[in-house]
Image (cartoon, rainbow, N blue to C red):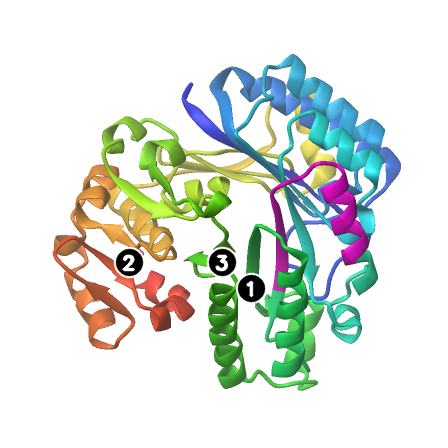
Amino acid sequence: MANVHSLYIHVPFCAHKCEYCAFFSEAANGEVVNRYVAALVRELEIIAPLVRPRTVFFGGGTPSLLNLRQWETILHGMERLNLLGAEEWTVECNPATVSLDKAKLLRDYGVNRISMGVQSLDEQLLDRLGRVHSREMVFKSYEILRKAGFENVNLDLMFAIPTQTMDVWRATLREAIALGSEHLSCYEVIYEEDTPLFHQLQAGEFDVNEELAAAMFDELVATAGAHGFRQYEVANFARDAAEAECRMTNDEWASGPRASAIRHSSFVIPSRACRHNVNYWRAGDCFALGPSATEYIGGVRTKNWSNTQLYCEQLEQGRRATESREELPPLRRAGETAAFGLRMNVGWPFAEFTRVTGFDLRREWAAEMTELATNGLAERDDEGFRLTPRGLRLADFAAEKFLR
């Protein structure tokens, strides 16, 4: 475990829970947040000897909601534990929570990538989603991030939002691209149970228009591609720095004991692709800290309690707040690896998949690959298997075929 190179940290606090959100989050309370910060530093102390981060990702929730003093506590702790210096260090933020002082503090400690939850640039849709920021806050926050020295910014957008029209989606894409960010993450609205948006759908307040959603996805791929972004995963588009391709060996992305076994395989992705997320899609190990966080190391999946108070209590007693632990059988691990990896445009080269998992896609999943290819959702050649553009739109459906 000493070679784990990815670290995820979940910050569960939000100013307001959005209508569509199913992630674990709660309203920020000063006393609770301070207690969480202290517990997080304790969890960092426990795992520090086992991780040397190449990628760090603070997700949420809204990590940028933490105040300067709370961020200083975390950053000082990471410095003391020799956890600074990651090649890619991302912090998620919402436009309403960005200040120049906070942005400069993060940048000074090595954060070099910001993922900003824009979702829409239409005021009515922002209200529909329960977002607390305005479109003007997006532009102001983006300017602050650039002023603080951030040269790698991702914008999160959503499409197929109830009442969203194609014209509004095109306008959002046009304005977002005009900002000049290095990365776009664009997600179709998912109606998760126990969210207000799901209950509104169940109550018949609106209908889902699958044809419009598919057309919006096609518009996204075409528009992003025409403006210098390359799709490298279903929902993710990145630019190439200085128009140069970034050819990486898999062990530069994946961590864990199997990295050395796949150092000879390579694939081409945009240089501004999110390295942390690519590690997930290529079955790399990752420590995950904070309430509800799920980590995967050496075929073992563990999950922390989705309860901030219980999380803090466990860490205050000197142990990690683990709710569950599951050791995956090899074939199941391989199936999940296949499913996640197919979300990337490059798919899976057969030889690479065998090196990573010990299984042969052509033997274990021959019928599934044939079915997807026959239906126009995938293509295969002598080298590998990948989803077609239409298959990427239906990636979740395709992925289910590989799960065991």
User: Please, what is the three-letter code of the amino acid marked with disc 2?
Assistant: Phe
Q: Which mark is drawn over residue 402?
A: 2
Q: Nearer the viewer, residue 140 or 320?
A: 140
- Which residue is denoted by mark 1 in the rendering? 187
- Which residue is denoted by mark 3 in the rendering? 229
Query: Badge 1: how crowded within 10 Å, few (<14), some, or many (20+)?
Result: some
Residue 139 in the magenta stretch? The answer is: yes
User: Callout 3: helix, strand or loop?
Assistant: loop
For residue 167, above or below residue 309: below
Residue 123, image x and y in percent?
A: 79, 71
User: Is the C-beta separation of discs 3 and 1 under 8 Å?
Assistant: no
The structure residue drawn at horizontal position 49% and vertical position 59%, both measured from the top left corner, is 228
Decide if residue 232 is on the left or right side of residue 44. left
Q: Nearer the viewer, residue 156 or 297?
A: 156
Report the magenta residues as a range: 138-157
Decide if residue 260 is on the left or right side of residue 194. left
Q: Earlier in the sequence, mark 3 or mark 1?
A: 1
Q: Quadrant of the N terminus?
A: top left
User: Is the C-beta separation of discs 3 and 2 under 8 Å?
Assistant: no
